[in-house]
Amino acid sequence: MGYVKKTAAVMFAAVLGSSVLAGGSQAWAQDTPGVTKDEVTIGAWVALTGPVAVYGVPLRAGVQSYFEAINAKGGVNGRKVNWIVEDNAYNPQQTVAVARKLASRDNVLAAVVAHGTAQTAAAFPYFLDEAKIPILLPYAGAKEWYDPPKQGLFGLHVLYEDQANAIGRWAGKDGYKKVLVVHGAHAAFENVANNVKPGLTAVVADGEVELMPVKIGTTDYAPITLEIARKKPDAIVAIQTLNEIVLLAKGLKQQGVDIPIYSYHPTVAQATIKLGGEFVEGLKSLSLTSSPFADTDAAKQYRADLAKYGGGEEPDFVSYLGYGAAKIFVEALANAKEPITRESIVQAFAELKGYDSGIFPPVSFSAEHAVGGHLLQPMEIKSGKWVPVGDIIDVRKF
């Protein structure tokens, strides 16, 4: 009873209008950028410094481990994969500078597994629109990216707005009616937070949702937890980084306030447990992947490759996600028609059907669907481990 069949976490999809593959294809025709007979050069912006490096460092380790393992076997159709990773420090302006460097100096074929929603969006005008370089499988996403579809953009995972809606429904099905949504005080977090209420009220018609913005980077949660205790919510939904969710959980329990906390997929990481310890016991969240600790062929190979090429990183859900995304990119690259160009890699993604990475459910891209995935596995921290709870959530039907 494999995870892919029974506990799949996310289905990839992407939009590619007929203008990309037909009338608009000339806009993407290139003189083989980033490709030689021996190598394919791609790039990414990833937060390797600052508080969000807790995601970026393991993400890089997972992606790099798969590419290094493939290169050790001779590469993809005889070409090694050269993945150039630049630190964007989770900063939109720095991301734009990195995007320009990758495009003009490194002449990359594509950006692959770029990191950060607001950060990646900041690079769209130059990278996608002007330079016309594809952005493939970013660790990021927003609904507005796909409506209308953006030429050359292929989504990675279940959109955060859909995750928030699913969390609202989950809390409602668990019997909670008064929900407080604690979120980062930034438009990107608020847009996600606004989707909790429609989910809750779909289950509990008279459910109440209140938003509570918190300045990003806040470390003193004493006044915040006091205010939460005063509001007396039945449950909390936290749309924040895992560092801040840990502080929130600690602050509440240190004051003797026992309120269940729900969150979205960036929380599902070993760092949450390491940083939070006993304070994050009972935390509920949603996972995009199977477990990196599973006894499956894919998970075993991931752990072996990470041990060899991951720079000392321990197995983790974040690096596992990166490893799986790298597998999907390599599959598309292997199927791309020669000569390899930005146009041919875009077309290869559009034609990728039913690819089973063993980490995500089988991947199918088409020209009809804009969002990435639609399957999520509810998880909970129990006895210091992330464990699956309940049935898989299909956000299209949940």
Image (cartoon, helix red, strand yellow):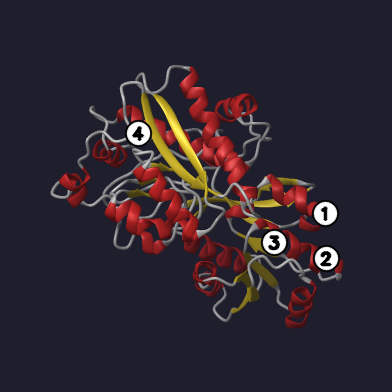
- Residue plotted at (21% across, 48% down): 20
Would you say the residues marked 1 and 2 are in contact, meaning their CB atoms lie under 8 Å apart?
yes
Q: Which circle marks residue 105 in the picture?
A: none
Task: Please tell me how crowded label 2 is: few (under 14), some (14-19), or many (20+) other residues with Cα within 10 Å.
Answer: some
Mark nearer the viewer, 4 or 1: 4
User: Disc 3 versus disc 2: distance between alpha carbons?
Assistant: 12 Å
Residue 248 at what x, y percent from top left? 74, 65
User: Disc 1 versus disc 2: distance between alpha carbons?
Assistant: 9 Å
Residue type at the position of mark 2:
Lys
Helix, strand or loop at disc 1?
helix
Q: Which circle marks residue 253 in the picture?
A: 2
Mark nearer the viewer, 3 or 2: 3
User: Disc 1 versus disc 3: distance between alpha carbons?
Assistant: 13 Å
Q: Is residue 49 left or right of residue 161?
A: right
Pointer 2 or 4: first along the chain: 2
Q: Is residue 398 visible?
A: no
Q: Nearer the viewer, residue 49 or 301?
A: 49
Task: Please tell me how crowded label 1 is: few (under 14), some (14-19), or many (20+) other residues with Cα within 10 Å.
Answer: some
Residue type at the position of mark 4:
Ala
**What residue does disc 4 label?**
332
Q: Is residue 13 above or below residue 150?
A: above
**What residue does disc 1 label?**
278
**What residue does disc 3 label?**
245
User: Disc 4 versus disc 1: distance between alpha carbons?
Assistant: 42 Å
Would you say the residues marked 4 and 1 are in contact, meaning their CB atoms lie under 8 Å apart?
no
Pointer 3 or 4: first along the chain: 3
Pointer 1 or 3: first along the chain: 3
